[in-house]
Image: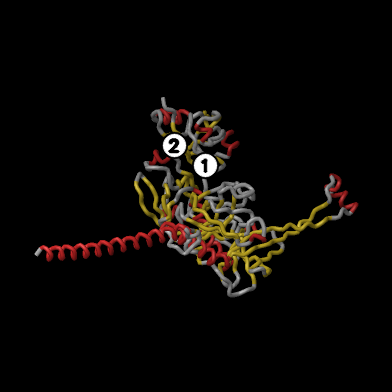
Amino acid sequence: MKNKQRSVLLFAGIFIGIVVGLIISSNFDWMMNSIAADRSAAAVPLGSSEPVPQELLVLQDFSKAFVAVAKIASPAVVTISSSTTVKQRFSHPLMDDPLFRQFFGVPEREQVMRGLGSGVIVNPEGYILTNNHVISEADAITVTIDKVEHTARVIGKDPASDIAVIKIDKNNLPTIKLGDSDKLEVGEWVIAIGNPFSDILEKTVTAGIVSAKGRSLGSGLGDGQLRYQDFIQTDAAINPGNSGGAMVNLRGELVGINTAIVGRSNVGVGFAIPINMARSIMEQLISSGKVRRGWMGVQLGEVDEEKAEYFGLEKPRGAQVAEVLKESPAESAGLKQDDIILKINNLEITSRDQLIAFVASQAPNSKLTLTIWRNKASRNITVTLGERPADEGLSSSGEPGEQSGKMGLDVRELTEQLARQYGYSGQSGVVISSVTPNSVADRKGLRQGDLILSVNDRGVTSVREFRAALRDIKAGGIVYLRIMRDKNVYSVALRTPRE
């Protein structure tokens, strides 16, 4: 019996030993394979085909989007070279005298001025959109596509918007799909394509974001002709030679025409004309060679913090109607003085210049839906645009700046002599006789000779009435003045000093 038990125990021990041995062997093989794999992974050089982390895959896909957009848009961006012949006389004081030049036959010499810019093919039949300043004074224009030069002719140009259209005799050209610049958002990625500095660097691609919309540069663009400004601001590098090139979104759509930089080279601030504005002008230039502009018939002012408070707006926005012209589309539509235009066709209005540029880009007889602020409530009205008269100035109040400080102005009665002097015949009000330097009146741009027509919508015809109107305003309150200057009516809101 004992022998039998020993046999069973011996067999069981052998069996257990075999199982344990197999387990140890298996684990050893797994462990060695694991160590080998780790060593192999550690030895894998950079650039191998090993799996890439998901985060890097996302960045690679993002990078491929820029590559794809550049491939789509670049073929439609062209180089534009221009030449202008300028006649010059030899420089000497005597040669400026016409009798001297006539008697001695002073010769003239010709100098050829050359320019470089960019353009975008917008029609496969050879129509190219660019800036007016790229080709404005040119005697000859050459367009280079794939190293081949083509002679171009001007179809039409519009200095007021800095838009021009030229054409070459070539068909089946690549184009870019036109996008909707109204839907462009601040912070959105865009690509700029053009020829910075030289035609050697043609079709250079730079990327950045939309830094701001609705920008106006005043008269800071040099030629003094650019009247309608509603720029897209970007930090994508835009340098000399990029003018007229394409600004493209990540869907490969043309959303702007690069047009301006700050300074002589890029400093991270560039500007483009929104394609919605350029499209309307371009279509008119192609169809008729000239631009007919929409006209509403109002003078406009900015809305600052004080005006917003006075009219019950939660923050400064929109553009204020300073005056409605008689027998104008605005008057027919029921627009009133002091209405604040907040939207046009669901487009948020952020400044006077933006509104002016938008209306001017629309064709006459266009119907616009305006969202306005009146009596501390919003409402919609429809305006059918007329055609801007040839001698009509900008619908702008040229209103002063937006600084605060002390009131600092003196007024006097409007005498017949002052009315003749300043052109106020038939008007009533009080004349500003002096403005204190650095006061709120000074910083708001009020000047000696301005005629104050009303204070907080209360007409004033004498100094006494003017002072009485001011007495009703509490310290720190808003003084809303309507003034006349150069036969134009403006408005300005000032905050009284706090006691």
Please state the horizontal and vertical placement of residue 290, each as a whole percent of the image: 59, 63
Please state the horizontal and vertical placement of residue 380, each as a whole percent of the image: 37, 54
Secondary structure beneath label 1:
loop
Q: Earlier in the sequence, mark 2 or mark 1?
A: 1
Please state the horizontal and vertical placement of residue 430, each as a whole percent of the image: 50, 33
Residue 441 shown left or right of residue 107 in the figure: left
Please state the horizontal and vertical placement of residue 482, each as a whole percent of the image: 47, 39
Q: Residues within 10 Å of mark 2 (few under 14, many from 20)?
A: many
Observer-nearest of 363 and 74: 74
- Label 2 – label 1 distance at C-alpha: 13 Å
Is residue 317 in sight in this rendering?
yes
Q: Quadrant of the N terminus?
A: bottom left
Mark seen at residue 399: 1
Is residue 362 in sight in this rendering?
no
Residue drawn at (56%, 34%), measured in percent from left and top? Answer: 449
Q: Residues within 10 Å of mark 1 (few under 14, many from 20)?
A: some
Q: Quick check: 498 above or below 400? A: above
Q: Which residue is mark 2?
A: 480
Q: Quadrant of the C terminus?
A: top left
Q: Amino acid at mark 2?
A: Tyr
Observer-nearest of 11 and 169: 11
Q: Quick check: 263 above or below 493? A: below
Q: Quick check: 182 above or below 431? A: below
Q: Nearer the viewer, mark 2 or mark 1?
A: 1
Residue drawn at (52%, 60%), measured in percent from left and top? Answer: 248
Observer-nearest of 402 and 452: 402
Residue 235 shown left or right of residue 198 in the figure: left
Observer-nearest of 26 and 72: 26
As drawn, the residue found furthest toward the right would be: 104
